[in-house]
Image: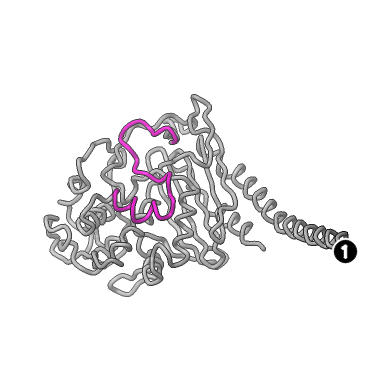
Amino acid sequence: MILNFFNRVRGVIAIALLAATVHAAPLTNAIAAARAEVGQKLATNAPGFSIAVGREKKILWAEGFGFADVARHKPVTPQTQFRIGSVSKPLTAAGLMRLVELDKIDLDADIHKYVPDFPDKGAVITTRELAGHLAGFRHYRGTEAYANTHYNSLRAGLKIFEDDPLLFKPGEKFSYSSYGFNLISVVMESAAREKYADWMRQAVFEPLQMTNTVPDPATPEPPGCTCFYELDASKTHFVIAPPVDNGFKLASGGYLSTPKDLVRFGFAMLHAGLLKQASLDTLFTSQKTAGGQSTGYGIGWSIRHDLQGHRVWSHNGGAIGGSAVLAIYPDSGVVIAMTANSMGGLDQAGNSIRLIADEFTAP
């Protein structure tokens, strides 16, 4: 009887091991295919590159390529922090919606309710319009992206653009503006009655255990951060990028993060939890112009379909010495995040992201 019992146990274990092996084989193949795609198409476009892919709330693959510090031959790891540029905007959108859920911000109220000293533009401007790039504010011009001026507050940083006239009447058309998100951060500070960075940490990053997502300091890079590079004048060699101060634009493009943290954030956007379902629906519904034309942009997110017709919620980011992409495929639950330590290092990543998503979608 005892022998028969152990035979049955061995049989159950054998079946479980076989099932695990069968399940692991597609994942192993997906990682191998994705690694080959990254090595051939992406990792050579910057000194350092990092990627994470997850599905169903599990990170399935995370790996670094190249160097975080070329001179010291310091390799990129999944824990290496990168500048994520405008991928900061979806993070801000989540913090914004937390305040909306607490009835501290009305997306459709005039922003002067929260920032009364902002110059009057002769028209009502709402936070919803700011978050959808419909408010009429300009984007960077000239060398503003290279600014190394320190501002003592986010409100002071609005001086860069606040006296400029609107490009068009709010709601009239879509025009991408990082400065609009800078204004959102001041709206959030007013509503939350605390600093924007503190609110984001307690309302978004800590609940999601995004321990490597922090404001980009205006001092030398933190120990876990990559160096920042750009191409030289000949466009053939990477050199250290000039110093910049991103403190005034945290909400629009001032965070450091890792692909693993960004994938965790992506998981939280797929199901109610951090945010209520109504908030998620608001984030991922394309806004429309006053004339009824869909913009393809919700609140802090690009809303589109890929070439195969799959829904994709995404955002790209570019910063001096850094670039990032975060893509969510809501129908399959696949989330992909990539970072590189040079601006433009992910400019050609679109097709690779789709191919990698397909690999990890396969059963």
Mark 1 is surrounded, within 10 Å at the Cα level, by few (under 14), some (14 to 19) or many (20 or more) other residues, namely few
First to last magenta residue range: 197-224
Left-right relation of 254 to 312: left
Q: Is residue 277 left or right of residue 333?
A: left
- Give coordinates of residue 68: x percent, y percent: 49, 33
Q: Residue at x 56, y 59 (%)?
A: 55
Residue 59 percent across, percent down from the top left: 56, 53
Q: Quadrant of the rendered structure where residue 166 is?
A: bottom left
Which quadrant holds residue 137?
bottom left
Residue 278: image location, x then y, percent: 37, 72
Give the main secondary structure, helix, strand or loop, of the magenta stretch. loop
* Residue occupying the far top of the picture: 71
Residue at 11% over, 55% down: 117
Q: Which residue is mark 1?
A: 1
Farthest bottom residue in view: 292
Residue 198 among magenta residues: yes
The number of numbered discs placed on residues in the rendered structure image is 1
266 relative to 238, above or below: below
Viewer-proximal residue among 268 and 235: 268
Which amino acid lies under the numbered mark 1 shown in the image of this protein?
Met
